[in-house]
Image (cartoon, rainbow, N blue to C red):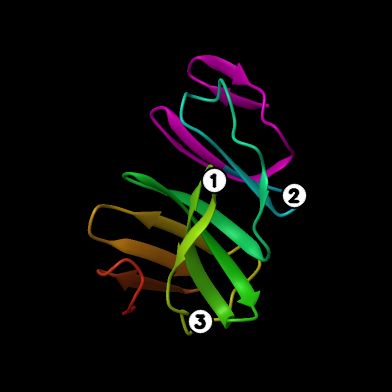
């Protein structure tokens, strides 16, 4: 359960991370699944497994997540999540993940990843990072 201005809302799992804004929310569960809501938590998508997920966030029209140490990337990588599954994945950030120290956020033209003591920015949806 999470407390909102409208009162408590039950989550479909034990959450380890939550990102919410207006009507939309994304939750990273303790079993490596991710679930989303587009109606202020009234309903949730079927939880889908996202191996190695370490953080979730919101972009203006998308749900985003970060993974660590996947077969394709030994450090941190971002991806897009929808109710139907995992979509586009970014290039690999050359920064090792520090447990509990990964956060992500996005606007229409900027993606920001905080990993450990550093901040990486991408102006091209994660194709390149600075």
The prevailing secondary structure element of the residues shown in magenta is: strand
Which residue, given by chain and number where applicable, does mark 2 sit on? Answer: 30
Q: How far apart are marks 3 and 1 (CA)?
A: 29 Å
Residue 10 is left or right of residue 31, and the answer is left
- Which quadrant is the C terminus positioned in? bottom left
- Up the image or down, 54 lies above or below 28; here it is below
Whole-angstrom CA distance, mark 2 to mark 3, is: 23 Å
Circle 1 residue: 84
Q: Which residue is drawn at 32% across and 70% down?
A: 121
> Measuring 50% from the left and 14% from the top, which residue is drawn there?
6
Q: Is residue 10 above or below residue 72?
A: above
Most foreground residue, 42 or 104? 42
Describe residue 3's horizontal placement relative to residue 123 as left or right: right
Q: Give the range drawn in magenta.
A: 1-26
**Percent x, y for residue 41?**
55, 25
Disc 3 or 1, which lies upstream in sequence? Answer: 1
Q: Which is nearer the eye, 13 or 3?
A: 13
The residue that disc 3 covers is 95
In which quadrant of the rendered view does residue 8 lie? top right
Side (left or right) of 75 relative to 106: right
Residue 81's spot in the image, x, y percent?
Answer: 50, 52
**Residue 124 coordinates in the image, percent (x, y):** 26, 70
* Mark 2 secondary-structure assignment: loop
Foreground: disc 3 or disc 1? 1
Kindly tell me whether residue 29 is visible in this rendering: yes
Q: Which of marks 1 and 2 is nearer the N terminus?
A: 2
- Cα distance, mark 1 to mark 2? 20 Å
Q: Which residue lies furthest to the front in this view?
A: 84
């Amino acid at each position: 359960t999470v407390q909102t201005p409208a009162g408590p809302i039950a989550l479909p799992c034990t959450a380890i991370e939550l990102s919410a804004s207006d009507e939309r929310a994304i939750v990273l569960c303790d079993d490596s699944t991710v679930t989303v809501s587009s109606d202020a938590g009234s309903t949730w998508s079927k939880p889908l497994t996202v191996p190695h997920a370490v953080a979730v966030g919101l972009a203006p029209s998308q749900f985003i997540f970060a993974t660590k140490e996947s077969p394709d990337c030994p450090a941190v990588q971002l991806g897009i999540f929808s109710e139907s599954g995992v979509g586009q994945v970014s290039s690999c950030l050359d920064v090792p993940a520090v447990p509990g120290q990964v956060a992500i956020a996005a606007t229409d033209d900027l993606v920001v990843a905080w990993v450990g003591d550093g901040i990486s920015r991408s102006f091209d949806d994660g194709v390149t990072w600075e």
